[in-house]
Image (spheres, coloured by chain):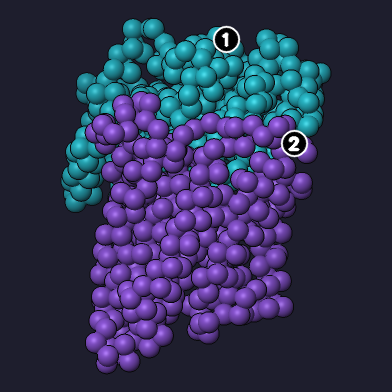
Chain colours: A purple, B cyan
């Protein structure tokens, strides 16, 4: 058991990193429009279907080599699927948010679930119910560090997720677009008054959120395969991360997501899966009871 | 993918045509109430396809109307689907969900309505309810788990088996049977752990399993979790023989694993259509591939056989649900997978087999057949 602990930790961090990507999407939309994009699970599901399909059907890329022996095909598929998912995010915004933007937040909350379910069942009908496996990000296999064996894919997931999380943070804090997105999130009417299109910024936020959730789907599709209902499972954990981390906080969501991933894996290893699940939800209840604003102070006071 | 869209369109048009009109009183009406979305969609889709193939090949003189309703994953949706089917016309029988939780919910309603449910659900409790309208065409856990345990102990020589099973009713039913049978065989479990269908990282369970020093790994998991457990075991350097549940015989499960990972992996099942050389089974498999563009599995074949037995009853003169029920309860039927006969509780299938992968092919080989092994050692 002792020799497995480093790999267990890596697995926990990798799982948490994937949760974090989904949770960041949640936070972006919460900050922009004040509601949870509950139907965002569809991004995970569709990407998990799309990446195996892309792996099987993309023409051989000369600079990578024949598909069968391709090293790094996942590095090509990751940005491609994020672009496709960004387009889906725009569609999501147009279908689930725009028509209801003047209604109470709960209407948007429900409409995102409805659109998500329609798209998920559509994907199930088109791609079929068979489980699938996506491509590794770089290459399959393990490498040994003395008595410790580590999975290359899991380390790749951690690295890629770290880059995407950092990139999102930099985009929001250092770029003009990020400043506009934050301005709209803070006060859409004032942002409109100084010439920023709130509608466009909200659509871009949805695109970014869905692309991030999609990247998580791609990163998970190799190690954990793909099943039609997987998106909802991952979204639930991301939602918990947002709640525990501090409503509306990117750093809180990422931190809590990592914590959840490691907690799940280590508790399953040292107690049991059933207890890990039960203790996770007990922990969430405890946080809500003792520190209802989350582990880090929440920036958004209204929860839907 | 274009083929799938075309198939979906055909099925949708067919469904629309069926639902747009009232059921023809002269036709026998057989609804197909199976999960084609959700975590058990793979097995439910196999059921649907097997039932459709049987109904599309109904014997001369038997005219059948059918429709497909998705029961998804909740008991409520399954019961609603059965309600709607009953409102549409009196079915002579219904192809019903593989998901035991849904079957347990549908069973009382079917009994009140007097409609036989033709299922491939393995949940043992289903035929212990005393409900005369349940007919199970896939061997229950009382059959397949005997084959599962006996192969591990008698053929592989296991003395210290370890088990990973699902937390669902399916998993708990199989775990109870395996634990008892293995104890009776003198090889009690040295480790067991329940996994929720949502569990993705199996390494924690595998690390504990390795620490228990087993000599064989038994799996009783759904399709995706079965492949995950085997892959992560092999990646963790656990190269013990694996005897898995029926999910591992499914071609779509095998496709998730490399040939090297499949080496030393066996599975219990009722049948393995793609492994058979019998001419009728080869013809069934060929038509199934052409019709649905996917490989048939034991669930598809069992549902095909079950619906064919209903059609045989209709051909033999049964013309309402009660007569079909009586015919199913009293006759023997030669199906493609095996010979079916009720044991008085609605258990129609009594044979099981073991398939193994040789590490060089994704098509498993049938290595052992067990006949009439209902709870018998």
Pick whichever, B48 or A95, lies toward us: A95
Q: Would residue B117 be found to the left or right of residue A117 on screen?
A: right
Q: Would residue A40 be found to the left or right of residue B340 on screen?
A: left
Q: Which of the 4 quarters of the picture holds residue A99?
A: bottom left
Spatial separation of the CA atoms under disc 2 and disc 1: 38 Å
Residue at (57% x, 19% y) in the render? B265
Mark 2 surroundings within 10 Å by alpha-carbon count, few (fewer than 14), some (14 through 19), many (20 or more): few
Q: Which of the 4 quarters of the picture holds residue A146?
A: top right
Q: Which of the 4 quarters of the picture holds residue B279?
A: top left
In the image, residue A85 sits, relative to residue B101, either above or below, namely below
Residue B318 percent across, percent down from the top left:
35, 28
Residue B282 percent across, percent down from the top left:
33, 12
Q: Secondary structure at mark 2?
A: helix
Label placed on residue A3: 2
Residue A219 percent across, percent down from the top left:
46, 47
Q: Nearer the viewer, mark 2 or mark 1?
A: 2
In the image, residue B370 sits, relative to residue A95, either above or below, namely above
* Quadrant the C terminus of chain B occupies: top right
Pick whichever, B62 or B372, lies toward us: B372
Disc 1 target residue: B368
Please indicate, yes or no, whether residue A121 appears anywhere in the rendered image.
no
Residue at (67% x, 10% y) in the render? B155
């Amino acid at each position: 058991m002792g020799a497995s602990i480093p790999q267990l930790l890596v697995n926990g961090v990798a799982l948490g990193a994937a949760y974090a990507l989904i949770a960041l999407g949640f936070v972006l939309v919460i900050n922009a429009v004040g509601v949870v994009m509950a139907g965002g699970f569809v991004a995970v599901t569709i990407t998990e279907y799309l990446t195996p399909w892309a792996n099987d059907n993309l023409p051989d890329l000369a600079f990578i080599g024949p598909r069968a022996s391709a090293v790094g095909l996942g590095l090509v598929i990751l940005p491609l699927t994020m672009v496709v998912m960004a387009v889906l995010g725009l569609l999501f915004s147009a279908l689930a948010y725009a028509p209801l933007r003047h209604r109470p937040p709960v209407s948007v909350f429900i409409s995102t679930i409805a659109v998500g379910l329609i798209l998920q069942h559509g994907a199930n009908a088109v791609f079929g119910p068979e489980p699938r496996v996506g491509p590794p990000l770089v290459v399959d296999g393990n490498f040994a560090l003395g008595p410790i064996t580590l999975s290359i894919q899991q380390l790749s997931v951690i690295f890629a997720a770290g880059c995407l999380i950092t990139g999102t943070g930099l985009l929001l804090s250092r770029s003009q677009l990020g400043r506009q997105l934050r301005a709209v999130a803070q006060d859409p009417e004032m942002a409109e008054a100084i010439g920023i299109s709130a509608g466009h910024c909200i659509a871009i936020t949805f695109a970014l959120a869905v692309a991030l959730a999609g990247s998580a789907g791609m990163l998970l599709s190799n190690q954990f395969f793909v099943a039609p209902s997987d998106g909802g499972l991952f979204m639930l954990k991301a939602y918990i991360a947002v709640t525990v981390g501090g409503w509306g906080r990117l750093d809180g969501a990422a931190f809590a997501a990592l914590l959840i991933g490691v907690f799940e894996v280590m508790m399953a290893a040292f107690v049991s899966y059933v207890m890990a699940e039960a203790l996770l939800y007990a922990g969430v209840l405890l946080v809500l009871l003792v520190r209802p604003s989350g582990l880090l102070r929440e920036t958004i006071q209204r929860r839907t | 993918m274009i083929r799938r869209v075309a198939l979906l369109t055909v099925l949708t048009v067919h469904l629309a045509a069926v639902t747009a009109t009232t059921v023809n009183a002269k036709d026998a009406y057989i609804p197909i109430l199976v999960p084609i979305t959700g975590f058990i969609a793979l097995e439910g889709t196999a059921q649907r396809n097997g039932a459709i193939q049987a109904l599309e090949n109904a014997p001369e003189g038997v005219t059948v109307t059918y429709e497909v309703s998705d029961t998804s994953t909740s008991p409520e949706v399954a019961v609603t689907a059965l309600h709607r089917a009953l409102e549409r016309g009196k079915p002579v029988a219904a192809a019903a969900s593989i998901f035991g939780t849904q079957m347990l919910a549908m069973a009382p309603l079917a009994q009140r309505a007097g409609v036989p449910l033709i299922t491939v659900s393995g949940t043992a409790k289903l035929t212990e309810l005393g409900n005369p309208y349940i007919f199970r065409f896939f061997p229950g856990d009382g059959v397949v788990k005997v084959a599962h345990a006996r192969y591990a102990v008698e053929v592989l020589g296991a003395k210290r088996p370890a088990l990973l099973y699902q937390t669902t009713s399916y998993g708990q039913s199989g775990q109870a049977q395996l634990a008892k049978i293995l104890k009776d065989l003198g090889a009690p479990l040295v480790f067991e752990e329940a996994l929720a269908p949502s569990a993705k990282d199996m390494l924690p369970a595998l690390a504990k399993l390795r620490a228990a020093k087993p000599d064989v790994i038994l799996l009783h998991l759904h399709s995706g979790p079965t492949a995950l457990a085997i892959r992560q075991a092999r990646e963790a350097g656990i190269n013990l023989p694996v005897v898995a549940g029926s999910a591992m015989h499914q071609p779509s499960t095998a496709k998730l694993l490399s040939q090297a990972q499949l080496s030393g992996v066996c599975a219990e099942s009722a049948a393995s259509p793609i492994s058979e050389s019998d001419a009728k089974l080869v013809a069934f498999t060929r038509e199934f591939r052409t019709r649905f563009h996917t490989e048939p599995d034991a669930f598809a074949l069992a549902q095909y056989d079950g619906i064919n037995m209903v059609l045989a009853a209709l051909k033999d003169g049964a013309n309402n649900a009660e007569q079909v029920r009586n015919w199913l309860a009293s006759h023997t039927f030669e199906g493609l997978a095996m010979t079916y006969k009720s044991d008085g509780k609605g258990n129609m299938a009594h044979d099981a087999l073991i398939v193994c992968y040789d590490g060089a092919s994704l098509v498993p080989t049938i290595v052992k057949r067990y006949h009439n092994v209902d709870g018998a050692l």
